[in-house]
Amino acid sequence: MARCTAPVRGHSSAAAAANCPACRYKSRGYSGYSGYSPSYSSYSGSSYPSSGGSSRSSRSSKPRWSKSSSSVSYTSSQIQSLTPIREAVEVRVVVQPDIRDAFLCHAWADRKESAKELHDLLEAAGVKVWFSEKDLGLGVPMMRAIDKGLANSKVGLVLVTPAMIERLPKESVADKELSALLAGNRLVPIVHNTTYEALRNVSPLLASRSGLDTSEDSMSEIAEKIAELVAT
């Protein structure tokens, strides 16, 4: 009868066990040999491929309106939420070819900070934006100017900030702007320094419209995406 060639503590590897005349015919697995212990370290922790992933890592394909030369990347959820808006833009420009690109809806408290930053980045990206600080002239009735701005813009951008969330439950100009934008596929919420969950608490309807978020993209990246969305 063949004798095991291993030391007292067992074979040091699977190869050694396979070469042993006494052990080579044993059943698969070498759990009886304490010296052999398969390592799974390469599958643990961050090394193991996950089924999910961050929004940045999941970006791959481009929407059909993005040029092949563009370096802007999108998540699949962004493409899904922006596609109906792009389709509405394409229909709208046939009827109104000379309209402005975007109407920027924002809280009054943001007019000199985040709203102005977004406006300036959009303008730098070639987007023609209706912005109250620039387009609401002295002596011009506010609501008439807003109605005109909405009627003559391809899309409406709603900058959702803590200040906007504070104002939404109250009667304000923003309410009137939003009601018009929500009437069709013309609305792109841009969440900044807050969350969709916080927005859902005060405006479930607005929160139901997917958009862009500065926790996923920088403000400049968002401006580039808007520029591609409205380009015709």
Image: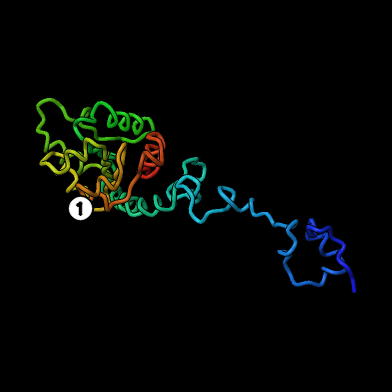
* Residue 101: image location, x then y, percent: 30, 40
* Residue 7: image location, x then y, percent: 84, 58
Q: Residue at x 50, y 40 (%)?
A: 71
The front one of 22 and 138 is 22
Does 197 appear above or below 22?
above
The front one of 162 and 36 is 36
Relative side of 143 to 87, left or right: left
Number of marks in the image? 1
Identify the amino acid type marked 1.
Ala
* Residue 207: image location, x then y, percent: 26, 50
Visual colour scheme:
rainbow
Q: Residue furthest front?
A: 8
Q: Residue furthest bottom?
A: 1
The front one of 3 and 20 is 3
* Residue 13: image location, x then y, percent: 78, 57
Does 11 appear above or below 167?
below
Q: Residue at x 37, y 30 (%)?
A: 124
Q: Quadrant of the C terminus?
A: top left
Q: Quadrant of the N terminus?
A: bottom right
Q: Residue at x 72, y 66 (%)?
A: 29
Which of the 4 image quadrants contains residue 23?
A: bottom right
Which of the 4 image quadrants contains residue 176?
A: top left
The front one of 144 and 29 is 29
Pointer 1 local density, CA inside 10 Å: few below 14, some 14–19, many at least 20 = few
Relative side of 29 to 8, left or right: left
Relative side of 31 to 178, left or right: right
| Residue at numbered disc 1 | 183
Q: What kind of element bears circle 1?
A: loop
